[in-house]
Each structure stands twice: as C-alpha cells, then as structure tokens.
Image (cartoon, helix red, strand yellow):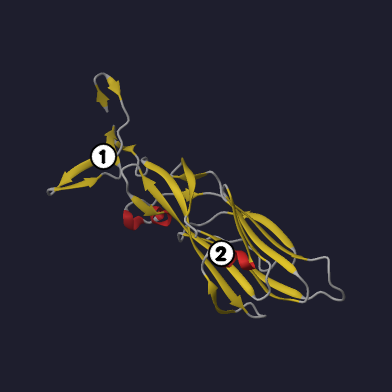
Amino acid sequence: MGENGVVRRANNLYVGVDGVTRSILQGFNAVGSARRQFFGRLDDINYVELRLSEIDVQSVNSSGDYTGQVGNTLTVANQYGDISISGLTFRVTCNTIGKGINLRGRFNAYFQDGREYDLSNLTSWNLKYGASVSFAVSWVFSFTRSSSGSGAWHGDGHWAVNCCGGAPDVDHVDTYGSGTFYPNISDNDFRLYSAIDTSNVSITTYSEMTLPSYITIDGHSIPLVVSNQLT
C-alpha cells in the first residue's frame, strides 16, 4: 500500500465482520477479465519450529515387541544409549540388549501476528489454506557389532525414522543404510527410534535424521528452527 509517497508491504491484514475482527488469509483483485492474487495466504509465516519434547525408553523382547516403559528422561536414555542433536541432525543410539529409545517431536508454523498452527494443518482445506509444503529428509540406519566375541554372530534390532507422514522405503537394514525421502505432510510428527532386540555379542545401533534449514511453503523458503525441550 502507498503511504506518504512510499510503497510498503502490508502484513497481518484484518477486517471487521459483524463486529468481530478477523485476519485476512488472502486477497484478490480483478485485472481485465481475470482474477489475480495480490496477497498470499501464507505470506506472513515467520518460521517453522521443530519442538523436541518427548523421550520414551522401552523394554523389548527378542522379537522387538514392546514389553513396558523404562523411563522418559534424558538421564534414563543415557543409561542405555545416547541422544545427539547437532544443528538439524538428530541421532538416537542404543547399546543395550532388550531396550529401545524413542525421540519424538512436532512441527509448528508461526505467523508474524503470533498465530501458531501444526505444519500439517497448512495443507488442509478445512483451514482455507490448502498450501503446498515440501522438504527433503536424509536418513541413516546403522547396526554394528563389537570386535570381541567368537563363533557365529546372531543379533537383531529395530529402527524407525518418521517425519510428517514420510519414512524410508526400506523393510530392514542388517548393517548400514542411508537415503532421502520427502514427507507427504499427512501428519505433524517427528520420530527417531533405535532398539536392540537380541544379540550374543556387544552391539550398537542408531537411527539418524537430517532436516534442511528451510522448508518450502507455497513457493516461499521458510526457516526451520529447533526448540529442544528435552529434560
């Protein structure tokens, strides 16, 4: 809009309807016989946050089935493995037979006027957005034995990498695997899981996920930040 001879960008637009002030999601005007958008639905998204808030340490049997919770703190997780966060790379390591460690979080989009939505809600037509959201996720699975031990080695473990409805297209990894996938944004969840079901020697398994610095929302590059609330 023009103000004192200067054109300035207008954000956080509001309009009064029936005595209530509501925010404007998008604006259009008529140019010739065509309708064109001049104000985007999501132009005022400030950033997307991954909020890490949950740890779950489990007991598992030799088939990898859940048999009970051991604890839900970093202190407990560090007794059976390790949780490492370096920038936008996250790793969950387990080095104890019969245990599994979960790291969970959720993605939220923050607008300049303080509004906050689950990232998956931006793709929903129910909220009048129906936005396109895309980003790539790199993953690594690793399962390694110690150099000690003799005879035939027998062992197994489980891994999981889930991000906004996406996961690696692999059934099992015996030693090491890596790749990239693109979440379909059908949900809002972040999860890394590593477990050792059974082994006759000392082993270590880990799952790792690396996220990009920016997420593309309706063609705009939106910063991705991490809020570590783990205790």
Residue furthest left as drawn: 19
Labels 1 and 2 touching (C-beta < 8 A): no
Secondary element under disc 1, as helix, strand or loop, is loop
Residue pictured at 61% horizontal, 71% vertical? 100
Q: Is residue 54 left or right of residue 4?
A: right
Percent position of residue 54, x then y? 49, 63
Mark 1 vs mark 2, CA separation in Å: 47 Å
For label 1, count other residues whose C-alpha is less than 10 Å away and answer few (under 14), some (14-19) or many (20+): some
Q: Nearer the viewer, mark 1 or mark 2?
A: 2
Q: Is residue 42 above or below residue 100?
A: above
Q: Which residue is mark 1?
A: 13
Residue 1 quadrant: top left
The amino acid type, in three-letter code, at marker 2 is Thr
Percent position of residue 136, x then y? 57, 50
Depth check, front residue: 206 or 24: 206
The amino acid type, in three-letter code, at marker 1 is Leu
Residue pictured at 87% horizontal, 76% vertical? 151
Q: Which residue is mark 2?
A: 75
Depth check, front residue: 115 or 202: 202
Residue pictured at 53% horizontal, 49% vertical? 135
